[in-house]
Image: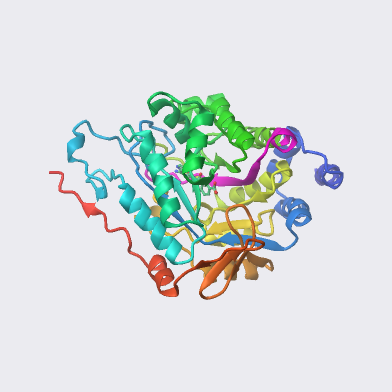
Amino acid sequence: MIAQGNDMFSTIRAKLTAGEPLSLEDGVRLYESPDIHTLGELANIVRERLHGRTAYYNINRHINYSNYCVLRCKFCGFYRALPKETAARNADTIHDDGGYELSLAEVVRRATQAYAGGATEVHIVGGLHPKLPFSYYTDLCARIREACPHLHIKAFTAIEIIHFTRIAKPRLSIAEVLTQLRDAGLGSMPGGGAEIFDDRVHDEAFQNKVGEAEWFEVHRVAHELGIFTNATMLYGHIETPAERIQHLIKLRDHQVESLRSRKAHFNTVIPLSFIPDGSAMAALPGPGGLDDLKTLALSRLMCANIPHIKAFWIMQTPKLAQVSLNWGVDDIDGTVVYYDITKREGEGTTHQELSVDKLKRLIIEADCEPVERDTLYRKIIRDEKTWRIEGEPWSVSYDAAAAHIANNGPVVPLTVANDR
Ligand code: V47
């Protein structure tokens, strides 16, 4: 048994050293092995080949513009149905059922506040809103671009992009939607909405959502247009280990083509640990820490051609994200500040934030060297008053007092509706 394990590890080590991709069987056997130490050591071969001991973080702000959604995905505790009597639903108001949508002015206010406090990125996603017109999304980018010239706008999952092709009047192609958004200020796309690329899991957990083919099509077109994107995997619900590994292989295969023939590619894989609270699958336990660690390490091992693996501390927790820095992970994301999509342990607050000091401490304690990055992994050079991207001629002034406000909320004074 042990000899068999050793054989397996040495075969895989030889493949990694030769730069050969691991097979589905390799991935499943690694997942099934109880030897997480050797798994971590193998994942670190790839991590250190690419990044040495560097670990990245960024100063960012998530903005979830609305939770109204036409879909009813079973894993999601974020969405709300927009009731028929929509006249009562004002923007910037939180209703009894938890539904809300932000006005453009509020989105821009939040972005501006983050920018004034030194953020380099806004990450903007929301539900598939049944009513907002496509112009809301182009205006959102244009107004942030105008107010915050160097703030990188990473926005809209592939699922939202498909939704925009359908709501635009007249309908637009994926390339037209992406081009209009980019012209308005979009910088790159996050990796959400991928879930698990498998028909069985799709039909059981997120049936009416566009599937794998459309998700990849959006990323293919983005890469052809030179728009960098990320890729996620939502694990720890009803999928099998083999389905997880297959998902990662599909990302890797897509990346082979993007690296060969397109202007951009995937920057980062973000394995998202399923948080059952508030979803229709709340009876499931969700993944434990060992499962998180194995999945992060396997993402590094299976997707050696995708530069970065991110542990999103909101989902894996800061402590496990820290441990994972020695299990293949090289990025622990950012300050975040507000995050509405999941709330761990039913804490009931969307204020979820790590200060720069805490992010750096997590990294240093893991024996790594913290490097602040922009969205595209360029190094940020910062002093108390300005930041700039290494190699760029411009710099941005920020205000430490504004950083304090941005980092110490509450900054979301949504009106509470009186629905009854
Ligand atoms: O698309 C929804 C997932 C995603 C749950 O690209 C859930 O840098 C866990 O994509 N438990 C949004 N996950 C988050 C996302 C992301 C996050 C951080 C960085 C980046 C990036 C992307 O969250 C959704 C969905 O797949 N999700 N519900 C849940 N209950």
Q: In this view of the protein, which residue sits in the foreground, 336 or 368?
A: 336
| Residue in view at x 52 percent, y 27 percent | 211
Q: Count up the numbered dots.
A: 0
399 left or right of 255 in image? left
Q: In this view of the protein, which residue sits in the foreground, 244 or 9?
A: 244
Question: Which quadrant holds residue 24?
Answer: top right
The quarter of the picture where the N terminus appears is top right
Residue 354 shown in magenta: no
Residue 54's place in the image compared with 295, above or below, is below
Question: Which quadrant holds residue 54?
Answer: bottom right
| Residue in view at x 37 percent, y 44 percent | 278
Residue 85's place in the image compared with 90, above or below, is above
Question: Which quadrant holds residue 109?
Answer: bottom left
Q: Residue furthest left?
A: 420
Region rendered in magenta: 256-279
Q: Which color scheme did the rendering employ for the protein?
A: rainbow
| Residue in view at x 44 percent, y 67 percent | 117
Residue 322's place in the image compared with 2, above or below, is below
Q: In this view of the protein, which residue sits in the foreground, 159 or 353?
A: 159
| Residue in view at x 77 percent, y 38 percent | 22
Q: Position of residue 275 (x, y in %)?
A: 46, 46
Whether residue 349 is visible to the viewer of this picture, yes or no, is: no
Q: In this view of the protein, which residue sits in the foreground, 196 or 29?
A: 196
Q: Position of residue 411 (x, y in %)?
A: 33, 62
Q: Position of residue 324 (x, y in %)?
A: 64, 57
Whether residue 88 is visible to the viewer of this picture, yes or no, is: yes
Residue 380's place in the image compared with 295, above or below, is below
Q: Position of residue 408 (x, y in %)?
A: 38, 68
